[in-house]
Amino acid sequence: MGVKLQELIIKDKIDYSTLERKIVAVDAPNIIMGLFTFAYKNKSYSQNELMTDSSQRVISHLYGLLFRINFYYSKKIFPIFCFDGRVPELKRIVTKDQLNDFKFTKNWYQQAIKSKNFDLARNIASSKEFLWPNIMEESKKLLNAIGVPYIDSPSSAEAQCAELVKRKVAHYSNSQDFDSLLFGCPKVLQNITKSLKRKVQNKWMYQKVTPISIDLDKNLKALNLSLFQLIDMSILIGTDFFPGITGIGLKKAFELVKTHENIETIIKKQNENYDFSHLSNDKINEIRQIFLFPEVLSEISFLRWDIPNPSKIIELTCEDHTLNKERVENNVSKLSKNYLACKSVFKSKKLVQKALNLE
């Protein structure tokens, strides 16, 4: 879901030339989810019309990742993909063992394919127990084949991206959500895509897409808020960890925080106007802790960008799945050329040679 801060946040339009020689930490679940909308030109797909192959599995993320990484390299950007780890209790909608659910449904899917029961395979492949975990698993395999480093975060991918930027391992975090700001990410990139337009959700119209950068310090100064207060405001309007308070939108939350400074005082002063019964002190502190002191990997010393491995990419996309081999090979050729051009640019920047293992 992500916190709805877009109407309040200052966004700066940027040119891709400013991103040359930059390392970008990518919020993998967020960006890969966006690749679901990838389709052939002039088509869009709903959740029930996802692009699948003869094995009944979704393939949008495979084409999408090939194109997206090729685009990063063409703009002289080195990406690091971060994946979610353990989901915090407050964010869990399903409390059962999701890992074992995936293992079970994966085996069930394989048996359905083996017995040529394709209707059953299609139903399993689109189930919540199989679809998203399988996409994440295949995305990691493809990134490995392409030669792009990825990190399995202990908890939130966005928190890990923010940590990489704070520690100057990366220059930006790339996510379409605004939660990265709550995790204290200094700089966030959005709308990083080759396409110049994006379909408006649930409407037959497109909007122009312009790359933007969001500076956390600039926004906090403009709003005259602390990060602590931005988090409190976000709790009031709703985050992935709390649905928010009924009747309090973005403008009202901003007004309340500016007037009363923190949630505890807001509850005392506004208790007769709003229902705060589900927002206990323990829950407030737990959510604050998730954003202010997230569980992340602090020491990152194994990053490396390698030349794409065509045979591994073909095996995953065209043999395991049934993507168009000629189309994939053409894109892998472009990917390799763009990788080498990108690597040469980074090699000329001596300060990052050691960090990138490019010496």
Image (spheres, helix red, strand yellow):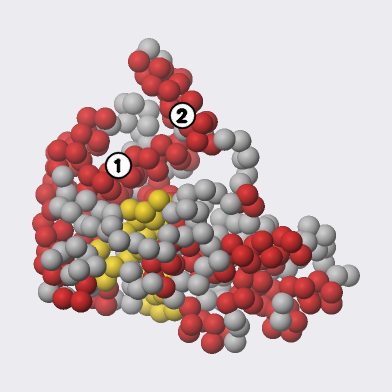
- Quadrant of the image containing the N terminus: bottom right
**Residue at the right extreme of this rendering:** 272
Tell me the residue at 48%/32% (across/down). Answer: 102
The type of residue carrying mark 2 is Lys
Classed neighbour count for the residue bearing mark 2: other residues with Cα under 10 Å, few (<14), some (14–19), many (≥20): some
Up the image or down, 249 lies above or below 87; here it is below
Q: Nearer the viewer, residue 262 or 14?
A: 262
Tell me the residue at 51%/31% (across/down). Answer: 100
Q: Is 175 positioned to the left or the right of 93 in the image?
A: left
- Quadrant of the image containing the C terminus: bottom left
Q: Nearer the viewer, residue 298 or 165?
A: 298
Distance between mark 1 and mark 2 Cα atoms: 17 Å
Q: Is 96 positioned to the left or the right of 345 in the image?
A: right
Tell me the residue at 45%/56% (across/down). Answer: 157
Secondary structure of the residue carrying numbered label 2: helix
The answer to whether one can see residue 199 in this image is no
The answer to whether one can see residue 349 in this image is yes
Give the percent coordinates (x, y) of residue 266: 78, 75
The residue carrying mark 1 is 141
Up the image or down, 151 lies above or below 55; here it is below
The type of residue carrying mark 1 is Lys
Q: Nearer the viewer, residue 269 or 89?
A: 89
Tell me the residue at 30%/42% (across/down). Answer: 141
Give the percent coordinates (x, y) of residue 16: 26, 72
**Residue at the top extreme of this rendering:** 115
Residue 249's image quarter? bottom right
Q: Which mark is residue 103?
A: 2
Secondary structure of the residue carrying numbered label 1: helix
Give the percent coordinates (x, y) of residue 154: 47, 53
Q: Is 4 positioned to the left or the right of 61 in the image?
A: right
Q: Are marks 1 and 2 in contact (CB under 8 Å)?
A: no
